[in-house]
Image: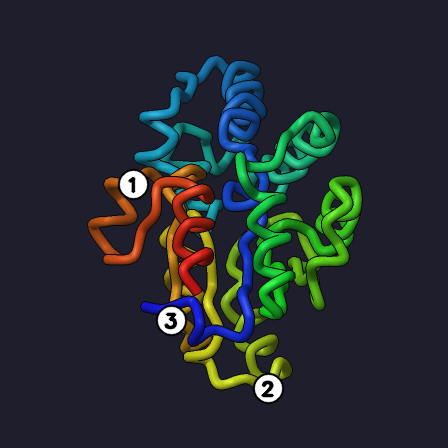
């Protein structure tokens, strides 16, 4: 596919533009350790992480009776937000966003992150000028952003085939299909290349590879 066909790019945030994979594993390992449960490494995390995250929590060992999902969510987000400023952007993220902006393509973020916190962290990195809209959930439970995506594509007013969604998980692929847009998955975040390539034929290993593709327009 040619980048020239797209007029708008919808970005996922966590794991796609923000490099928070190991950070997220560390926060979750804190929750597991406090309960004497087996810890995660990258391999196990990549095997188990998925949306809705409620199911993922219980797959990795939490007891739904002793540890209600709502309580776990508060504990995880409290730990995550406490040190979130220490996360870095994915390599090449800033340069890629700049290149897309300079090409005349508009951009937005669609995230399962809490809406207010998404605005704070995007502003922290000085990236807000690149985006015409930042959209996150109104809660901390990270269930799905599919309906938000559908509402956004209707409001955007562009034919869905002129919009590209960039994400790092199979949930992003499902959201793109719900919206009717094309999707490229970046295997540098919360789902590994093997899982992504088993379900989708447009996968890049990192944002630098995507930048080369955009340069071809």
Q: Is mark 3 on a helix, strand or loop?
A: helix
Query: From where the camera sits, is residue 56 visible?
Result: no
Q: How crowded is mark 2: few (under 14 residues within 10 Å), some or many (20 or more)?
A: few
Q: Residue 133 versus residue 105: which sits nearer the camera?
A: 105
According to the picture, the residue beneath numbered tag 3 turns out to be 177
Residue 66 picture location, percent across and down: 53, 31
According to the picture, the residue beneath numbered tag 2 turns out to be 157
Q: Is mark 1 on a helix, strand or loop?
A: helix
Q: In which quarter of the image is residue 44?
A: top left
* Pointers 3 and 2 in contact (C-beta within 8 Å): no
Q: Residue 193 carries which label?
A: 1
Q: Looking at the image, which residue is at 72% across and 33% down?
A: 81
Query: From where the camera sits, is residue 30 visible?
Result: yes
Q: Which of marks 1 and 2 is nearer the N terminus?
A: 2
Marks 1 and 3: which is nearer the front?
1
Q: Residues within 10 Å of mark 1 (few under 14, many from 20)?
A: some
Q: Distance between the residues labelled 3 and 2?
A: 17 Å
Q: Residue 86 versus residue 106: which sits nearer the camera?
A: 106
Position of 17 with respect to 37 (left or right) is right
Residue 171 picture location, percent across and down: 41, 56
Residue 16 picture location, percent across and down: 51, 45
Q: How crowded is mark 3: few (under 14 residues within 10 Å), some or many (20 or more)?
A: some
Q: Distance between the residues labelled 1 and 3?
A: 19 Å
Position of 49 with respect to 123 (left or right) is left
């Amino acid at each position: 596919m040619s980048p020239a066909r797209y007029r708008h790019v919808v970005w996922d945030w966590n794991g796609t533009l923000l490099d928070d994979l190991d950070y997220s594993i560390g926060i979750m390992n804190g929750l597991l350790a406090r309960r004497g449960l087996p810890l995660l490494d990258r391999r196990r995390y990549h095997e188990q992480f998925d949306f809705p995250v409620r199911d993922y929590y219980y797959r990795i060992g939490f007891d739904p009776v002793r540890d209600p999902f709502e309580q776990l969510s508060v504990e995880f987000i409290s730990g995550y937000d406490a040190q979130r400023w220490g996360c870095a952007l994915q390599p090449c993220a800033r340069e890629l966003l700049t290149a897309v902006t300079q090409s005349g393509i508009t951009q937005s973020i669609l995230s399962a992150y809490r809406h207010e916190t998404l605005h704070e962290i995007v502003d922290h990195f000085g990236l807000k000028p690149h985006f015409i809209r930042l959209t996150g959930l109104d809660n901390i439970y990270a269930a799905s952003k599919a309906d938000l995506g559908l509402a956004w594509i209707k409001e955007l007013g562009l034919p869905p085939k002129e919009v590209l969604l960039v994400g790092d998980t199979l949930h992003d692929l499902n959201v793109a299909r719900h919206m009717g847009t094309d999707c490229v998955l970046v295997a540098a975040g919360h789902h590994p290349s093997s899982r992504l390539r088993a379900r989708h034929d447009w996968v890049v290993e990192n944002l630098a590879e995507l930048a080369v593709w955009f340069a071809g327009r």
